[in-house]
Image (cartoon, grey):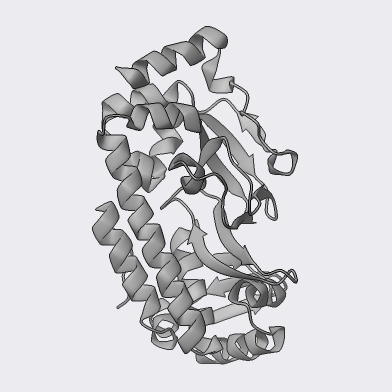
Amino acid sequence: MAATRLTEEYRDRNPHPTLAPVIAAPQHASAAIQAPSPAAEGRSNLLLGTLPDSVWRRAQAVMQLIDLRAGQVLSEPGSVTSFATFPLTAIVSLLYMTRDGASTEVAVIGNDGMIGLGSLMGGNATPSRAVVQTGGKALRIPLPWMQEAMEGGGALLEVVMRYSQALMAQVAQTAVCNRFHSIDQQLSRRLLTGHDLSQGDELELTHEAAASLLGVRREGVTSAAQKLRLSGAIRYRRGHVAVLDRVRLEAGSCECYAVTRKAYRALLRVRLPLAA
């Protein structure tokens, strides 16, 4: 089998394949690499968790457990990545940049997805900037291994294709939200999404960062956050937002949050939080 052959090649080149170096990793995307314990942690990523045991066992031979830092840039527009990154506890934003340096978030990726999809599918460059919003752990798998494992179809290809549809649905829904819905609704949607992907009820998010992600003025985010605080939906202090009442937060959001969650639920065939 092709995937087995490529796994054996990685083993031949490195007697400790779980510590194999990242291929052509950009300097600004460096991360602390650890010896992984995939059985304990890797399956917490929903994509990896849906793989059959046979594919999962082969992938363990080449994957790396890494720590991602908040603010770390994983890829820039126009760059080509050499690995797929699967967040476990980290949360990553995909940002589209304008010529004058402004940016807006088009997708949020946590343990429900992966970074590097464009390069994996044969694209010559990534169209967006991938930045770590919340530091945490992730798994990295070299793209050559994944590409060969996907040849001829099989479970890995099916998972990647279904995820690409889910990600496109999120990008499209975010575009609609940014165009037609209020800052109050956009902020509620973003907080709900961040809460879904976080390990607890507190998010690391400043008003300035939220404004940059939503592509709006900071004053608008401050006003929206104040309304949510007064309603009892959230509590915030410098750089941290605590979700106190999801029902009220969902009430302040638009339909975009529920639409995106339903798309992920259907396409990834996993249980995800849905709006009440």
In the image, residue 224 above or below residue 81: below
From this view, report whether residue 19 is shown above or below residue 66: above
In the rendered image, the quadrant that contains the C terminus is bottom left
Residue 170 location in percent, x, y?
A: 41, 66
Q: Residue at x 59, y 88 (%)?
A: 224
Q: Residue furthest front?
A: 124
Rendered view: 75 above or below 240: above
Residue closer to the observer: 97 or 130: 97
Q: Residue at x 30, y 65 (%)?
A: 263
| Along the line of sight, the residue nearer the viewer: 138 or 264 | 264
Quadrant of the image occupied by residue 60: top left
Place of residue 41 in the rendered image (x, y in percent of width and height, measured from the top left): 45, 37
Residue at the spot 53% in from the left edge and 17% down from the top edge: 17
Where residue 65 sits in the image (x, y, percent)? 55, 33
| Residue 154 seen | yes
**Which quarter of the rendering shows the N terminus?**
top left
Image-based side of 234 in relation to 73, left or right: left
Residue visible at 49% across and 33% down in the picture: 143
Residue placed most toward the observer, 1 or 229: 1
Q: Nearer the viewer, residue 23 or 87?
A: 23
- Relative to 132, 53 lies left or right: left
> 209 above or below 251?
above
Question: Residue 163: x, y in percent?
Answer: 35, 51
Can residue 245 be seen here? The reply is: no
Number of dots carrying numbers: 0
